[in-house]
Amino acid sequence: MSSPILELTDVKTHFPISSGFLFRRHVGTVKAVDGVTLSVQRGEVLGLVGESGCGKSTLARTIMQLVPTTAGAVVLQGRNLAAATTGELLAARRDLQMVFQDPYASLNPRMTVFATLAEPLLVHRVCPPADVPARVAELMRTVGLAPRFMQKYPHEFSGGQRQRIAIARALALEPKVIIADEPVSALDVSIQAQILNLLAQLCRKMNLSLIFIAHDLSVVKHISDRVAVMYLGKIVELGPALDVIEHPRHPYTRALVSAIPTPNPDVERARQRIMLPGDPPSPIHPPAGCAFHPRCPHAQEKCQLAVPPLAPDGPTREVACGRLSEI
Amino acid sequence: MPLLSVTDLRTYFHTRSGVYRAVDGVSFSVERGETLGIVGESGSGKSVTCYSIMGLIPTPPGRIESGTALFDGTDLLHCSPASARAIRGKRVAMIFQDPMTSLNPYMRISEQIIEPLLIHENISKRDALVRALAMLESVGINDATKRIHLYPHEFSGGMRQRVMIAMALITKPELLIADEPTTALDVTVQAQILELIKKMQRELGMAVIFITHDLGVVSGLCDRVQVMYAGRVVESSDTRTLFYSPKHPYTRALQRSIPSLQPKGAELYTIPGMPPDVSKPIPGCSFAPRCEHVTDRCTATPPALAAVTPTHAQACLRIQAGELLER
């Protein structure tokens, strides 16, 4: 395989917690992302799943350098963004763009579609100012919006159309990698299908790499080539999408897959759920050893002692479970 | 006689920009002990239907224009406020989507949970607290004696939803209306809450109306399902029939747009256009503008629900006329 376009090596993003009013003291650390190693190939769709608080959005923001990296390297086409200067970062962002979850919050309500889509073109001097209107019209057509809506404001569009505008904005600089953080979670099923089709089609046509973050496994399975499952700041399972979701190996992935209701009454009624007790633990006080052990049906004493590393399991899979061979 | 029977319910919102027909002629019934799923996309009127039954429509701008909701012989929409109060909150209870905004942040859990008991039953505070503790334990809150005096913010999302369920069920209602109770929760927690609702339903023998946009949740939980679109019921049947032989074009289109029912990576079916503007009268079928089988008659004649079999009804004129072939 050719060298990956984006490579993360042992990336950590920790946030300090302070307390007190006059004398701020450091009282703890939230290890939102805690040692993630991951690579994305050219044209690949990588799905990133996990429950709320598992650090998937922080990982996205870390890759974008919207939050400072505590340790590790984020290498985009040979450049380490974690150590880059502001100027280098600005240049790197031409190749790395993001689409956010809520298209109501991520578009500026006072900017027309034209202003929103022209801004990246002007900031990065992609084309001469005279060509901007034509380029904006082209972008709008790419995402399936009529260019005659160019002078409209975000509030005049529906949720699905707003998400199209947000995608067009991300595409404006012809990036190589797009990170989409729950881009369809706020949308209705029929609109969700439109956006999923659009993203899949864009990736194919433009050979884009996409990091697709979602909590809905069926959506991730549909669009992704590979899937990474996160739990409490760490990747616990990584592999080809169909494999991971149809034959999960890590006890957490198994529980996650079994918890998803399927729209098929006969299957749904016959199946045995793996019920996880409790809630995901707090990343401020993560459990010792394997972070999943307090909820794991297979946990043993040794699981509390050491953090299991993400280890190869077959040629394409990686799983972080200390008891993998026994269960 | 059904426990609840709603006939020709119309709830309109009179705003400055027009009259929004949120619910426009909805009829259905719920038998004792059964689970009815109401499915639809946002704006389809599924929540407003249940809010109307519970008397939660803000008036003005909302107004119930017509219809009856007979609960065990009492019309909840036209009876005296006193007799409605004796039913709502005691014999019919409701839980909501977001347990953070529907619990009072200023009140301790203990006070909130015994409130319905103090209002509806002649019971001392001490006895009410004993009942509340037992209820909290049966909804799976450990350490209830200690945690009952905490405030809502001291609970996690899943735990808050358990508190809400305990509060709704403490008066042993005959009907529970659940408005997207798991939408805000993670999948593993969602599985816990759905299991809890099933368990409580078995224990109390109550009927449940479950509102959701997730067809997967419906398939495992509900005995019957009705699909709503633009304020009207377009199809209603037992769960198996709805999933395995849906008739109405909207239900079919919805199923074709769900990723988990399609082969991986296949282009998803997208319903063209957008849901209709319910502030303008819709003379014919509300789905006609987006339907692939539309004819002139569809846009002129309002369709009514007609039985296909005794347990299956749908509101497509062309299917009723036998014009559309079976799948």
Image: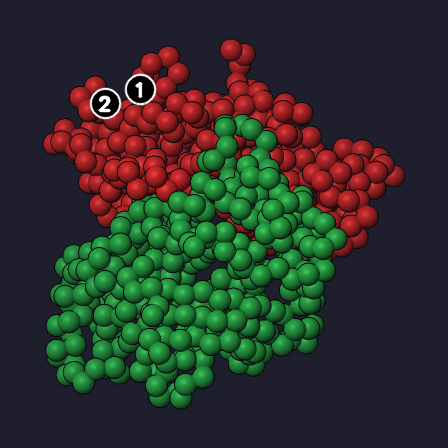
Chain colours: A red, B green
Q: Residue at x 38, y 32 (%)?
A: A229
Compared with residue A226, is residue A64 higher up or lower down, i.e. above or below? below
Q: Is residue A65 visible?
A: no
Compared with residue B282, is residue A216 higher up or lower down, i.e. above or below? above
In the rendered image, residue B202, in percent from the top left (x then y), is placed at 22, 57
Q: Nearer the viewer, mark 1 or mark 2?
A: 2
Amino acid marked by disc 2: Leu
Compared with residue B38, is residue A115 higher up or lower down, i.e. above or below? above
**A226 and B269: which is toward the camera:** B269
**B289 and B72: which is toward the camera:** B72
Q: Is residue B162 left or right of residue A218?
A: left
Q: Residue at x 29, y 28 (%)?
A: A250
Amino acid marked by disc 1: Ala
Of the two numbered discs 1 and 2 on the same chain, state the one appearing first in sequence.
Answer: 1
In the rendered image, residue A272, in percent from the top left (x then y), is placed at 25, 37
Which residue is label 1 attached to? A311
Q: Is residue A64 left or right of residue B272?
A: left
Q: Residue at x 21, y 64 (%)?
A: B204
**A136 and A283: which is toward the camera:** A136
Q: Residue at x 17, y 21 (%)?
A: A326
Compared with residue A178, is residue A189 higher up or lower down, i.e. above or below? below
Tell how many labels.
2
- Mark 1 and mark 2: Cα distance apart in space: 10 Å
Q: Chain of mark 1?
A: A
Q: Quadrant of the C terminus of chain A?
A: top left
Task: Look at the numbered discs 1 and 2 and tell me whether their residues touch, using CB distance below 8 Å.
Answer: yes
The disc placed on residue A324 is: 2
